[in-house]
Image (cartoon, grey):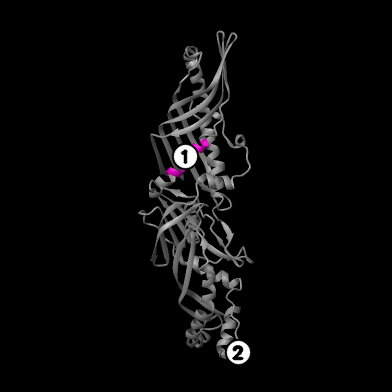
């Protein structure tokens, strides 16, 4: 009986599960573009590494290595892949880091100092971003895994005590390599959980479209990664700003995404457009000012009754012309068909049939232009700031439409993150140095 009850509850939950009004698929075709932009960001982050001063004594020689700075990242091999369990995995092998530091050496009463260039070679980094849905419905980097190692270091010492430095170089470079190993993963952890999350904060979740309605792009579940794509389900529903808790039931078919030829695909179901029309109606944007001497009395009463709800417009069908400008979705709606009925009796519903044609004409002339004037202004697709769609292609399906496009970085990751980064302290968000491979 317990098994039967559990099965019944599972079936009941499935029957009441709400379909997304909007889906987005990022394919592996986008990974090369994302990787190149990400590596530029990674190089800039590694330049922020702070390595403690290295001091020591060997016999009568005292040395101090300070002001160590990472100057460049040189890559030999790098791969960015989708991994199951909601992860993006970046792997860098056999890379090198350019460094510059200050040297100071004291031997009895003789002093030598200056700046010197060095290199960390055989750098390997493997880091994964785990993506999830937070309680507000926003996509977040919820965890960062990291392994990093530096296999060897080289420093071209010169100056008065070159032979002495050659003797000490093993101690100095070994100490620097150990310290550098300890710093890479904390920097990457901070970059993922703080800086990249500030970028994801620019994706709209519940935001205003205009002075009347808003759009709900909250994630319905965690993003799902396969080896070839990353899929995200958004609610994709409009709502009147005066009734933020109002929700239109979603009875549309679930949009499907099968293609993988373009960098990104977005699907919108009929529910997305139906919720827009219903939200504008509830917000008062579609009310008609009817003048008795211009509109037949019966039709006048019908229209007014319709807006008061005693006569119901059943599942009005809309066709939509879509266009994208950057990441603003512009829509022009056309009323294809609808039918009306009375919620009092079937006999009254039959009497309303002759009025369907003039009412449709009235809606097309008086309502649809007002609605299109607003929807053609555009509503933002849930993408981060600085990323736009290009080369888009719209395809109509039964009950939904899809838009395939490529991505374009109108702004660099660094520019957007610096604009939106929170005031934080790196030490408060970084894990202990044991995260790095020593």
Q: Which residue is mark 1?
A: 128
In the rendered structure, which segment of residues is drawn in magenta?
35-45
Mark 2 or 1, nearer chain start: 1
Q: Residues within 10 Å of mark 2 (few under 14, many from 20)?
A: few
Q: Position of residue 255 (x, y in %)?
A: 43, 61
Front residue of 86/180: it is 180
Residue drawn 59% across and 82% down? 305
The alpha-carbon separation of the residues under discs 2 and 1 comes to: 67 Å
Q: Residues within 10 Å of mark 1 (few under 14, many from 20)?
A: many
Residue drawn 42% across and 67% down? 399
Secondary element under disc 2, as helix, strand or loop, is loop
Instruction: Residue 41: say if magenta.
Output: yes
Q: Residue furthest front?
A: 160
Q: Is residue 134 above or below residue 290?
A: above
Q: Mark on residue 296?
A: none
Q: Position of residue 357 (x, y in %)?
A: 47, 85
Q: Position of residue 352 (x, y in %)?
A: 51, 86
Secondary element under disc 1, as helix, strand or loop, is strand
Residue drawn 46% across and 57% down? 23
Is the Cβ of the residue at disc 2 closer than 8 Å to that at disc 1?
A: no
Q: Which residue is mark 2?
A: 292
- Is 227 placed left or right of 384 in the picture? left
What is the chief secondary structure element of the magenta stretch? helix
Q: Residue furthest left?
A: 261
Instruction: Residue 264: say if magenta.
Output: no
């Amino acid at each position: 009986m317990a098994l039967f009850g559990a099965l019944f509850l599972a079936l009941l939950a499935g029957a009441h599960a709400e379909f997304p009004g909007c889906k987005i698929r990022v394919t592996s075709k986008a990974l090369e573009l994302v990787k190149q932009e990400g590596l530029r960001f990674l190089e800039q982050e590694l330049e922020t590494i702070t390595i403690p001063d290295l001091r020591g004594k060997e016999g009568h020689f005292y040395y101090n290595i300070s002001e160590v700075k990472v100057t460049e990242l040189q890559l030999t091999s790098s791969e960015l892949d989708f991994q199951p369990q909601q992860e993006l995995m970046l792997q860098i092998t056999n890379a090198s880091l350019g460094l510059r530091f200050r040297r100071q050496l004291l031997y009895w009463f003789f002093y030598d100092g200056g700046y010197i260039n060095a290199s960390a070679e055989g750098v390997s980094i493997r880091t994964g971003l785990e993506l999830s849905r937070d309680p507000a419905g926003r996509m977040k980097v919820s965890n960062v895994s990291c392994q990093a190692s530096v296999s060897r270091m080289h420093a071209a010492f010169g100056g008065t005590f070159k032979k002495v430095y050659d003797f000490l170089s093993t101690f100095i470079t070994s100490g620097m390599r150990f310290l550098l190993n300890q710093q890479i993963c904390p920097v990457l952890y901070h970059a993922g959980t703080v800086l990249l999350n500030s970028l994801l904060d620019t994706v709209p979740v519940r935001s205003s479209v205009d002075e009347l309605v808003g759009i709900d792009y909250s994630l319905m579940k965690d993003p799902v990664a396969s080896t070839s794509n990353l899929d995200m389900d958004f609610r994709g529903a409009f709502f009147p700003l005066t009734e933020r808790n109002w929700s239109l039931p979603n009875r549309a078919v679930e949009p499907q995404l099968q293609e993988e030829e373009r960098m990104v695909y977005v699907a919108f179901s009929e529910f997305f457009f139906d919720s827009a029309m219903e939200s504008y109606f509830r917000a008062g944007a579609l009310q008609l000012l009817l003048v008795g001497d211009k509109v037949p009395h019966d039709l006048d009463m019908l229209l007014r009754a319709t807006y008061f709800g005693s006569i119901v417009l059943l599942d009005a069908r809309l066709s939509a012309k879509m266009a994208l400008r950057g990441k603003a979705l512009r829509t022009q709606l056309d009323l294809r068909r609808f039918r009306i009925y009375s919620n009092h009796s079937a006999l009254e519903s039959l009497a309303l049939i002759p009025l369907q044609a003039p009412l449709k004409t009235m809606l097309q002339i008086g309502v649809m232009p007002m609605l299109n004037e607003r929807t053609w202004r555009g509503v933002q697709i849930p993408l981060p700031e600085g990323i736009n769609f290009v080369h888009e292609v719209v395809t109509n399906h039964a009950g939904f439409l899809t838009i395939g496009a490529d991505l374009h970085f109108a702004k660099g990751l660094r520019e957007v993150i610096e604009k939106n980064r929170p005031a934080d302290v790196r030490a408060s968000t970084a894990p202990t140095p044991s995260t790095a491979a020593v």
